[in-house]
Amino acid sequence: MKIKYDFNSKLLENISYFSFLLFLLSATLKVVLIYYEINSFVDLTLASSFMLIVYMLANYNQMRSVNLLGSISIIIFFSFVILCCLSLSYTLSPHYSIVKTVLMSLNVVALMYPYFNRKLDIGRLIYHLQIIILPIVIWFIFLYNIRWTPYKYLINIDNIYLIRGVYLALSMWLGIFILYLSRSSAGISFYKWRLLFYILLMLLLGARGPLIFVILLTISMNVTSIINLRFHKKDLKYLLFLIIGFLPFLIKYFNKFMSLFGFGFARFFKLFEEGGGESIKERTRLLSFSYDMIFNENIIYTFFGYGIGSFSLLYQGEDIRYYPHNILVEAWFELGIIGFILLTIFCLIPFFKKNKSKIPLTIILFLLINSMKTSSFVDLRIMYSLISIYLVYDLYE
């Protein structure tokens, strides 16, 4: 009887683990389905979140003990979600506000699951995330760049435009992998080359901000190692073989190479142009508009905001998904100063933890900095999960 119980328990843990993996990746996987016009009869996010909710309800008595910082983060997060729900009573958005509230509520699953799976293996999680994300990154780079070549007939260009924004999410995943691997000391030579490969992929994606953030944070994590950096003979041999093998090929096919991968390089070098390109100009307009609307003559909006999901309606005149590309500004715009304070406190809690965690703090910092220029607060389930993991799992546990 005991063997059967252990088997069932292990099975349930694995089902919940892979449901959690699917939950974190569902938005990225949907991009692949959209491109190939595959209609899933079940929404991946809803299905995986349902499985996780059932698991947590069935194992509520197995919940890990919650420390003070964890308790505060849970209270703050639930208060923020409740505020989103309350703002439905006065929001200017009649339709998208409901969708956004549901999406924000599902983030509770992301926050709470690490507290219920007592045997969550962080290394295993990062490993499986890499296995799934890397092929999607390479697939997307190929699709997005081949459209500028004579071989564009091989792809569905119209569908590429539907999924073009995913490069930011993919670069976020790569940044997480880079910062996690940077702390590893095992197999240092192998990790060095893998990190360089991931950085190259971020460059080819054209993700300028995340690339700069992750390089700076990686350097800050490894200042001593970089100062004392020594290449082994094996490393130098690999480097020499790469140069000898790749340089003639690059010289011969330079124009074709640039036509295929020029998009990522071109986006990066636009940073040095006047104004930084249209992307930066648009973000400047978003922040300027948000500031004017938050601090207008009617102080009521400063305190209570315009209601969840209202930004796009006021900025574009359409009740659709759009946001200021800064989660704290977004929170203040839609939920008022209370929403701003709650989300700010929640984001700062990890920096008060004294014990080292199983994930480096730089990952949390990377996601926070990235969210100040890219994300909406409803899209950050990986950040909410990693904050819980950071608070719950000590390095030497």
Image: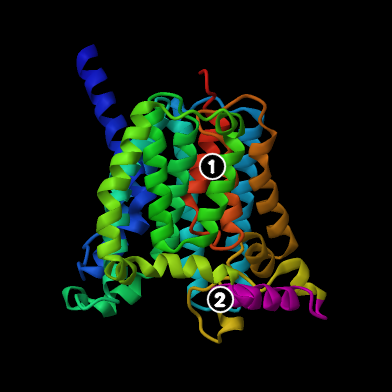
Residue 40 horizontal/vertical position (percent): 22, 63
Give SS at disc 2.
Answer: loop
Residue 97 horizontal/vertical position (percent): 52, 71
Front residue of 13 and 212:
212
Residue 380 horizontal/vertical position (percent): 50, 54
Left or right? Give the position of 195 relative to 143: right
Tell me which segment is drawn in magenta.
273-298
Examine the structure image and report whether residue 282 is included in the region drawn in magenta. Answer: yes
- Measure the alpha-carbon separation of dots 2 and 1: 27 Å
- The quarter of the displayed image where residue 181 is located: top left
- As drawn, which residue projects farthest toward the bottom? 317
Pointer 1 residue: 363
Pointer 2 residue: 277
- Can you see residue 120? no
- The quarter of the displayed image where residue 83 is located: bottom right
Which residue does the image show at 26% across and 56% down from the upper left? 248
